[in-house]
Image: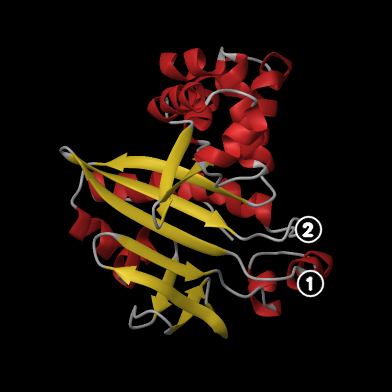
Amino acid sequence: MDEVFRALADPGRRHLLDSLNQKNGQTLRELCDGMGMARQSVSKHLAVLEAAGLVTVTRRGREKLHHLNAEPVNAIADRWISRYHRPRVRALAGLKAALEGSTMGFSYTTYIATTPEKLWEALTDPVFTKQYWGVEFTTDWRPGSVMSWTESGVTIEDPEQVVLEAVPGERLAYTWHTFTPEFAAAHGFSDEWLASAAAATGRSKVLFEIEQAGDVVKLTVTHDDFDPSNVAFQGIAEGWTQLLSSLKTLLETGAGLSFATAR
């Protein structure tokens, strides 16, 4: 936690976070163009932010893409918010909202005491996903294959719900589910919410990247390609923090947490 506060203390690093908040998933060159700072200096700042867990890195070919990671801010909020009145943490809440509120997408990183094989199973096997997520997937997990989602007694099927990537123990990506009237009714969403969610252009996608990190496994989840007007964005952003906590707890203790799921 001390590393997070030290990382945020520098105005240059805060500017980098602001830049990623406006456009997530930038390359080093893009960040340098917006900073007016030498490439080496930007790289050093990014290294500090990455060490603090505030920035995560994914790869697109030879390029490294930098993403905001809201998990450290969530940890600060979880530790302190119950001990102080809301006015005293208003600034922290604003920072948390800024880090999670990108109109393009968001990225989370967590470390789990498990193996890549077991984590892959937890992401794909409906026996596991039902325990920590409440969702069951039906698919053969081959790129291009259609997925059906079953949650709260509702099965969501759509030809655009597809597997994008599937490398066991390394990478998994798929498009997000369709917002149907049955889904909205099962979760108590209004007709207005459904109309707004259904009107959003495009379809978001989620990417899981699995890496061995010493005795633990590093999991990076990137959910992006959101329409800025999508009303489901905030609920999904908040849901992922709970969902990943439940996944981590299940793999490390054998029992998931009772949280509302990501929508």
Q: Nearer the viewer, residue 187 or 68?
A: 68
Q: Position of residue 5 (x, y in %)?
A: 50, 15
Residue at the spot 52% in from the left edge and 32% down from the top edge: 74
Q: Position of residue 222 (x, y in %)?
A: 49, 52
Q: Amino acid at mark 1?
A: Ala
Q: Quadrant of residue 98?
A: top right
Residue at the spot 79% in from the left edge and 72% down from the top edge: 199
| Residue linked to disc 2 | 229
Residue at the spot 60% in from the left edge and 54% down from the top edge: 236
- Categorize mark 2 by other alpha carbons within 10 Å: few (<14), some (14-19), many (20+): few
| Residue linked to disc 1 | 199
Q: Nearer the viewer, residue 246 or 204?
A: 204
Secondary element at tag 1: helix
Q: Is residue 22 above or below residue 125?
A: above
Report the disc number at residue 78: none
Query: Are discs 2 and 1 less than 8 Å apart at CB?
Result: yes
Q: Is residue 252 visible?
A: yes
- Image mark count: 2
**Left or right of 135, for residue 160:** right
